[in-house]
């Protein structure tokens, strides 16, 4: 295993050795992809196909299809499957981006070690990583898209428009349109400036290609707003909590993707703006019987990455933006309200870790 924390000549040499020697390459990222996840796989695929047009390269997610991002280059090449491991035996190189544990990419992560395949991980999360043959994990990067910019685009004399759009799509997505930048990550601004200038990008136009939402998504946002309440637990910062029932989901035949998109928009718009409420989370039933959390925090709020990890949930993320899931037993369908009760009980027995 070779580990790096930044893109330098040594990492580039190692990375492209793996690319050069591979006959077939699988690129993947975490389930329920967000903008940084999707931008990362698309940018990596696009640039590798330019340099290695004869190589067999595929993008596969173990996830429900994500609609609404068809504007971006090569989105039509993305495949969504129920079990990515069925495909794995046909590849000799697996590249995982925007996540550093196998359980973020597949429900059956324990089987991956049975495959004879080289693994490369490129990520920026602080979670304890699994073991990969080659890994670059830089928690100081704003996004995986920033890391891939430094790997694939920074040395180019001119960045073409579609590649610039992909990199900026991911950076904006994981920084809340640059809202989450502090002094430790301000080096992203020259990168954004270059992408905007060389790509001839109007950011408001670009956002219209990935941030617009349908009436069905608006229905989800309405339901979450209606069901929101402020939770006050001794010693903990006040938190805004919202959830939807399984009955609401079934009545409106909502997909996991629609629930995820609506939840992220809701928590972005309302989850960090209430006076004296410094963090928020949504509780969402899933079609596989699990219940997921989407969490956001601000300064003076709870470290939501550690909150998820300490609760023992499957998931991870950043100190101020994270997600996790309660995983059911075989054939079980978890109830969102019971999961919320479990969270509250846990909070009453533990002290918060703040951002």
Image: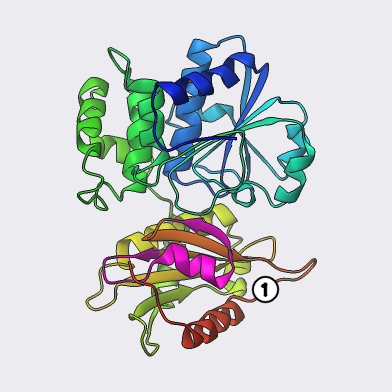
The percent coordinates of residue 221 (x first, y second) are: 41, 64
How many marks can you see?
1
The residue located at (33%, 26%) in the rendering is 164
- Kindly identify which residue carries mark 1: 334
Residue 18 placement, left or right of 241: right
Quadrant assignment, res 278: bottom left
The residue located at (63%, 47%) in the rendering is 102
The percent coordinates of residue 213 (x first, y second) are: 40, 50
**In this rendering, is residue 175 above or below 262?**
above
298 in magenta: yes
256 in magenta: no
The residue stretch that appears in magenta: 296-317
Residue 110 placement, left or right of 163: right
The residue located at (52%, 55%) in the rendering is 258
Question: Tag 1, which secondary structure?
Answer: loop
Q: Is residue 322 visible?
A: yes
Quadrant into which the C terminus falls: bottom left
């Amino acid at each position: 295993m070779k580990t790096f924390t930044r893109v330098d000549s040594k990492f580039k040499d190692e990375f492209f050795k793996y690319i050069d020697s591979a006959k077939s390459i699988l690129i993947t990222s975490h389930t329920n992809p967000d903008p940084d996840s999707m931008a990362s796989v698309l940018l990596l695929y696009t640039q590798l196909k330019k340099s290695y047009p004869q190589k067999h390269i595929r993008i596969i997610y173990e996830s429900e299809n994500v609609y609404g991002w068809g504007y971006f280059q090569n989105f039509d090449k993305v495949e969504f499957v129920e079990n990515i491991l069925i495909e794995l035996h046909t590849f000799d190189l697996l590249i995982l981006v925007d996540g550093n544990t196998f359980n973020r990419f597949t429900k059956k992560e324990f089987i991956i070690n049975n495959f004879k395949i080289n693994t490369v991980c490129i990520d920026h999360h602080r979670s304890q990583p699994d073991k990969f043959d080659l890994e670059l994990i830089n928690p100081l990067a704003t996004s995986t898209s920033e890391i891939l910019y430094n790997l694939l685009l920074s040395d180019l004399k001119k960045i073409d428009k579609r590649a610039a759009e992909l990199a900026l799509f991911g950076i904006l997505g994981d920084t809340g349109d640059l809202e989450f930048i502090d002094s430790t990550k301000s080096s992203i601004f020259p990168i954004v400036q270059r992408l905007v200038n060389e790509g001839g990008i109007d950011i408001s136009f670009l956002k219209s290609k990935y941030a617009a939402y349908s009436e069905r998504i608006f229905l989800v946002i309405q339901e979450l707003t209606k069901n929101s309440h402020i939770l006050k637990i001794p010693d903990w910062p006040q938190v805004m909590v919202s959830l939807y029932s399984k009955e609401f989901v079934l009545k409106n035949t909502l997909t996991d993707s629609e629930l995820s998109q609506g939840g992220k928009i809701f928590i972005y718009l309302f989850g960090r703006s209430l006076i004296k409420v410094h963090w928020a989370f949504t509780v969402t039933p899933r079609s596989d019987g699990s219940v997921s959390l989407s969490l956001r925090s601000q300064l003076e709020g709870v470290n939501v990455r550690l909150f998820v990890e300490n609760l023992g949930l499957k998931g991870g993320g950043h100190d101020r933006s994270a997600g996790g899931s309660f995983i059911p037993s075989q054939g079980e369908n978890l109830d969102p309200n019971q999961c919320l009760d479990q969270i509250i009980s846990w909070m009453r027995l533990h002290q918060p870790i703040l951002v």
